[in-house]
Image: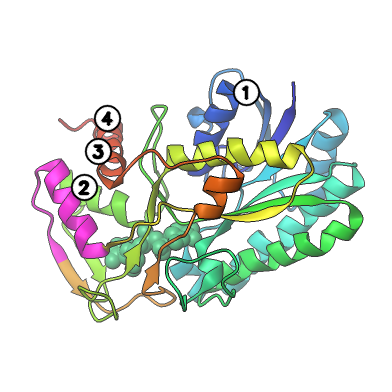
């Protein structure tokens, strides 16, 4: 049985992936600081180590006491908006600490890593849907901090490290009885659902003057369960020592206004919207071509935007005990 170390495995995408990997028969060790993660999101019986990916002693302890076949590195900060006001927080956590992890892996003879990268590495795309060979030119420091780790991993190939980068588009939805829960919450769909459930009065609409059909930003929302299954497929490639970059999205874009309307339909609630100015660092359109992942990883997204929002709403109601 293969043993996989999952950093950030108690986070939103990490914990869904851990459930999926356990179902596929992998032996999982979750390594998470619990600064953002939720230990109760993990399946029963999964080995857990509380530690920081920037702490070489913590890492050496885990690597030296387990035979680890591969690492999946989810741990990181994820807010594009916050990265514009606190870039050092992002470069320290996402880039510098990530390099510590790669060094610890290498020192301990672990040579395979899958890295949670992001659509934010592309910046304002010149062509949509975005293919993996599109130039990278991030417009927020979050994307830049992730790109820096991609580049470090690319150069680490000379030291025998194989790496797969999954560039996620907008993860959303819920599965395995767990869902999207950030503190503070800044993501579109959970915030809209908080308005629907009465936890918030309104949603702030960040920018209505973008060069898009209705003036609001367009994103490619992918069900977190589809993201989780992409990891399982990519792991099979990594186990063969293969490297690669894959966009993980659906190929369909929805504007912020469209998402609000779908949430109105799914929840049956009126959602109050207040127009605000643009949030710094938001590209107008991010939509994936995931044909490469479909072909090379033998992976297909199964869920559409209604499934995503329905699952998120069901989980939100259960979590907040709303009828
Ligand atoms: N938005 C609002 N109001 C809000 C929250 C968001 O109008 O209260 C808008 C944003 O301005 C943006 C869109 O909704 O146009 C989506 O915003 P999110 O914060 O939900 O997501 P982002 O697109 O900023 O970023 C997310 C993840 C990143 C990932 C990126 C990839 O947070 O980790 O998707 O596309 F890299």
Q: Residue at x 59, y 29 (%)?
A: 21
Earlier along the polypeptide chain: callout 3 or callout 2?
Answer: 2
Earlier along the polypeptide chain: callout 3 or callout 4?
Answer: 3
Q: Residue at x 38, y 58 (%)?
A: 220
Res 38 visible? no
| Residue bearing mark 4 | 318
Q: Position of residue 263 (x, y in %)?
A: 19, 49
> Under tag 1, what secondary structure?
loop
Earlier along the polypeptide chain: callout 2 or callout 4?
Answer: 2
Q: Position of residue 150 (x, y in %)?
A: 69, 62
> Under tag 4, what secondary structure?
helix
Tag 3–tag 1 contact (CB < 8 Å): no
Earlier along the polypeptide chain: callout 3 or callout 1?
Answer: 1
CA distance separating discs 2 and 4 = 14 Å
| Residue bearing mark 2 | 199
Viewer-proximal residue among 314 and 50: 314
Tag 1–tag 2 contact (CB < 8 Å): no
């Amino acid at each position: 049985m293969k043993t996989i170390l999952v950093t950030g495995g108690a986070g939103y995408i990490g914990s869904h992936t851990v459930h999926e990997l356990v179902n596929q028969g992998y032996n999982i060790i979750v390594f998470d600081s619990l600064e953002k993660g939720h230990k109760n999101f993990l399946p029963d019986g999964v080995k857990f180590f509380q530690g920081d990916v920037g702490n070489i002693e913590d890492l050496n302890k885990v690597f030296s006491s387990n035979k680890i076949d591969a690492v999946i590195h989810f741990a990181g900060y994820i807010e594009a908006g916050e990265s514009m006001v606190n870039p050092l927080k992002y470069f320290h956590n996402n880039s510098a600490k990530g390099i510590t992890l790669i060094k610890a892996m290498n020192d301990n003879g672990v040579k395979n890593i899958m890295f949670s990268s992001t659509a934010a590495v592309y910046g304002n795309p010149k062509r949509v849907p975005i293919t993996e060979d599109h130039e990278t030119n991030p417009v927020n420091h979050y994307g830049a901090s992730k790109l820096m780790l991609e580049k470090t991993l690319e150069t680490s190939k000379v030291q025998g490290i194989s790496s797969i980068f999954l560039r996620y588009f907008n993860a959303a939805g819920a599965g395995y009885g767990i869902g999207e829960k950030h503190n503070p919450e800044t993501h579109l769909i959970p915030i809209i659902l908080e308005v629907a459930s009465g936890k918030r009065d309104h949603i702030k609409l960040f920018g209505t003057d973008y060069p898009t059909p209705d003036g609001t930003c367009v994103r490619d929302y992918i069900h977190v369960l589809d993201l989780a299954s992409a990891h399982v497929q990519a792991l099979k490639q990594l186990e063969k020592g293969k490297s690669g970059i894959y966009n993980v999205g659906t190929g369909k874009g929805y504007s912020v206004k469209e998402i609000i309307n779908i949430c109105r339909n799914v929840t049956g609630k009126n959602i109050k919207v207040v127009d605000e100015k643009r949030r710094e660092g938001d590209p107008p359109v991010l939509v994936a071509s995931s044909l490469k992942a479909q072909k090379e990883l033998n992976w297909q997204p199964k869920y559409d935007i209604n499934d995503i929002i329905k699952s998120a709403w069901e989980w939100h109601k259960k979590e907040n005990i709303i009828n």
